[in-house]
Every structure is written in C-alpha cells, then in structure tokens.
Image: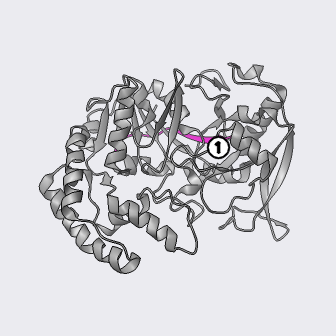
C-alpha cells in the first residue's frame, strides 16, 4: 500500500522519526516539496541524523530515496548532507538516491534576496533566510534554473547570465548592495554540478517502470505552513498538503490509499503568525527544554502551546487523513494538568466553522489529568498509564480518525502501536 505522510500542525511534528519507522515496509521514499528550510531528525544507534533534503529513508540500505520535482535544492547543502552521511557510514550513491531533473536550484542570490526582503518588510514572516521563497518565485516567474539546466554547462551559463542581468540592478537600486560576478558564481557552481550530476535523472520515466513498488511520500513543514491552506502570509512557499504529493514528486501514476497525518501531543510553531494556544512562562520553558524544541535547521526556540484539536480537525479535512500518529507524548509526562483546545471563541462567541484568520481567536479548553511517569520504554499501548490512554482515546474520538502509532521517546525504537496489525 502506498502512503503519503504530512504534518498536521506548523511543522516540527517529528515526521523524520516516523518516516524512518514506516519506510521499513516500502521500497521508495519520495520528498515532494520544500527545501533545506526543513529539518527531519532521526536518532539511530545513538547517533543523531538531521536531514534537510535527503529523505530519512536513506538510513535503510535497501531503499531508493527520491528528491522530487517540487523540491528546491541548494547544491552546497545537498553535497554537505551526503558528505556527513558517508562519514557516518551511510551508503549514498546514484543507486539509492535519485534527483529529479525538473527540481529547481537555489542560487546564492536567492539567499541574499531572502534576507534583504525580510529586513525591509513591516510585517515580518520569520523566514529561515535559506533562499527558498525567492527560488520558488523564480520558478513561477519562469526564470528559474532547473537541475537539468544546472548539470548542462551551456544551459547553466546562459540561464545564469540571464538571471544576473535582471537581478544585479535590483541589488544595486533596491537594496544598495553589490551584485554577483558571473565568472565567480559560474566557476563555483559548475564544480558543484559535476558532483551532483550522477544522481540526476528523469524520475518520472525511471519510476514509471517500477509501479509495482511500494512508495512513501514524505512531506516537509506542516499543513498550516501550506502556501494555500496555511495561516497566510506566515507560511512557506510551497504546497505541503497530501494532494501535492503526486504533482510534487512527478509520479502521478501512483495510487495513494494511506494518508497519514503526524501531530505532536502539544503544538509548536517557529517564526511569526497567530497561535491560539500559545503558552508563556514555566510551562513554555518546560516544553522547550523537555521536548528539545529548538529548530533542527535554524536552532531557533519554538513557540509552544497546548494541543489544538480544532486546528487538527481542519488539517484532517484538508489532507483527507485516514490515519493519525501522535508524537512526543512522553514530553507531557511530568505535567500535573494538560489542556487541549476543542473550539475557538471570537469576540466572546463560539466560532462555528474554522475561521478565515486565527488572529484574535481565543481557545476553549478541556483539562486532563497528567500521568507523572516515564513512558519511553513502554512497548504496548495497554501498559500506558490510564491518564495517557484517556488523553489519546479522547483525541481519537474527537477527531474521528484512528491513531496508528504513538511516539514515546527520542530513539527510533521508542514507538508503539495503538492497534495490532498496523504497519
């Protein structure tokens, strides 16, 4: 059965660990959007791996990993990631890593523009300044440099000159900055292209012949960072929802039957934007420290809040989710009381439908008793504390979607099934 896995909150739901777990039962793992503004963390054999572009399935020797056409690729970041993996003893070659020739390249001017635009804005977005947005902008403006161009010297030279002809005056006039010299950029990036070239192929044609394989589509960020469905304008620059999996991967012939949504047992977000259940004070400090809530890509502390079921209910509809996975349940272990948001209020009145904007929204909470116990070594749902089971059962009943797995610790093996027969 083919699977798409997406985050149901504002990213950082622990998808890396879950993808690592689920990919044991698939043949191909595909990343279909985003860039190195995302970070998936997996702790395996007491080693910490942080993936920014390569699917975390690369840790399994018999899997093929794909960077799809909807991804924007920073060549330096990609090559550094490959280098780190090889140094750690992980095999990375053209046999187990495929990069779509239609994916777009992040150039140095994208990163600079990203930073300069954020400085000038009155309404800050909280961008990672990795050049993701400007690269997607060039893609839509039809002046982007695709991987197929990047590995072709003549095409790369032509497109780079064309871009610098447009962008250098913008740097000078709009930002009072120096532009880029063609020769220095071309020489540096041509060397990077040579190293990346063996991994590049027409992934649509390659996988069309392998339709009998089992595919897992790996989403980055989370539903409410989606360019359309998210809390706009405080969103990422790509479509992160499940329906984009086939378009962003370039594999439309794959049938997706299993649509898995991942959510933390509480809520976090990085950057600016509304956050109805956001916490301050001691509980915020506790969640940040106990949950290690610091960005895998930027190191920024994450904003933390109680679990928002109104938010999750919307995400489930947007993605047509039919399986849930709850992560970081163990982080709540030492809290005497735990709250979940059931509904929203605005101007003192209950909001019936999911609001167009989350600005000035107030949460309506239900309180649960905590369990005050380390659950990281528990392997069976029935052995969880009664209070933890009550919490999970309520979430499942309220959202009307079955919970398949629960992550109860940092290690890749610290995960349990809620029901027998799940895989």
Q: Position of residue 127 (x, y in %)?
A: 51, 60
Visible in this render: residue 344?
A: yes
Q: Quadrant of the C terminus?
A: top right
Visible in this render: residue 136?
A: no
Q: Is residue 27 magenta?
A: no
Q: Position of residue 157 (x, y in %)?
A: 16, 60
Q: Label 1 belongs to which residue?
A: 293
Q: Position of residue 200 (x, y in %)?
A: 24, 42
Q: Position of residue 394 (x, y in %)?
A: 78, 39
Lateral position of residue 160 relative to residue 316, left or right:
left
Q: Is residue 252 magenta?
A: yes
Q: Residue at x 40, y 30 (%)?
A: 58
Outermost residue on the left side: it is: 154
Q: Image height check: is 133 above or below 210?
A: below
Per the image, label 1 sits on a secondary structure element best described as loop
Lateral position of residue 13 relative to residue 110, left or right:
right
Residue interval drawn in magenta: 251-265
Q: Residue at x 29, y 70 (%)?
A: 179
Asked whether 375 or 202 is in front, the reply is 375
Lateral position of residue 151 relative to residue 261, left or right:
left
Colouring mode (rainbow / by chain / secondary structure / one colour): one colour
The mark tally for this picture is 1
* Rendering quarter of residue 296: top right
Asked whether 103 or 331 is in front, the reply is 331
Q: Image height check: is 201 above or below 147?
A: above
Lateral position of residue 304 relative to residue 191, left or right:
right
Q: Residue at x 52, y 62 (%)?
A: 228
């Amino acid at each position: 059965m083919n699977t798409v896995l997406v985050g149901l909150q504002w990213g950082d739901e622990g998808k890396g660990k879950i993808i690592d777990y689920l990919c044991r039962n698939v043949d191909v793992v595909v990343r279909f959007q985003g860039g190195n503004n995302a970070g998936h963390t997996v702790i395996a054999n007491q080693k910490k791996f942080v993936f920014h572009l390569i699917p975390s399935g690369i840790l399994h020797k018999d899997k093929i990993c794909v960077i799809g056409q909807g991804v924007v690729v920073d060549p330096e970041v990609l090559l550094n990631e490959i280098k780190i993996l090889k140094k750690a003893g992980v095999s990375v070659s053209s046999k187990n890593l495929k990069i779509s020739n239609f994916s777009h390249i992040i150039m140095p001017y994208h990163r600079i523009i990203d930073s300069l635009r954020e400085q000038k804005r009155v309404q800050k977005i909280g961008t990672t300044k990795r050049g993701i947005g400007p690269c997607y902008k060039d893609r839509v403006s039809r002046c982007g440099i695709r991987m197929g161009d990047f590995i072709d010297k003549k095409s790369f030279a032509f497109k780079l000159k064309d871009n610098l002809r447009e962008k250098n005056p913008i740097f000078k006039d709009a930002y009072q900055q120096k532009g880029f010299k063609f020769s220095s950029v071309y020489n540096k990036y041509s060397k990077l292209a040579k190293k990346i070239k063996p991994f590049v192929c027409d992934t649509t044609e390659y996988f069309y012949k392998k339709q009998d394989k089992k595919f897992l589509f790996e989403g980055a960020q989370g539903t409410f960072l989606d360019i359309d469905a998210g809390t706009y304008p405080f969103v990422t620059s790509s479509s992160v929802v499940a329906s984009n999996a086939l378009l962003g991967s370039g594999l439309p012939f794959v049938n997706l039957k299993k649509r898995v949504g991942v959510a933390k047992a509480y809520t976090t977000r990085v950057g600016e934007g509304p956050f109805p259940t956001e916490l301050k004070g001691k509980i915020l400090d506790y969640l940040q420290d106990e949950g290690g809530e610091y960005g895998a890509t930027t190191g920024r502390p994450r904003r933390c809040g109680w679990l928002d079921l109104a938010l999750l209910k919307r995400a489930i509809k947007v993605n047509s989710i039919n399986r849930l996975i709850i992560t970081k349940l163990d982080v709540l272990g030492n809290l005497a009381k735990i709250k979940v948001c059931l509904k929203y209020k605005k101007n003192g009145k209950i909001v019936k439908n999911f609001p167009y904007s989350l600005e000035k929204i107030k949460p309506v909470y239900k309180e649960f008793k905590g369990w005050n116990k380390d659950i990281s070594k528990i392997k069976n749902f029935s052995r969880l504390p009664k209070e933890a089971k009550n919490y999970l059962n309520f979430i499942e009943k309220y959202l009307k979607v079955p919970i398949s797995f629960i992550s109860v610790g940092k290690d890749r093996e610290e995960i349990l099934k809620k029901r027998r027969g799940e895989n």
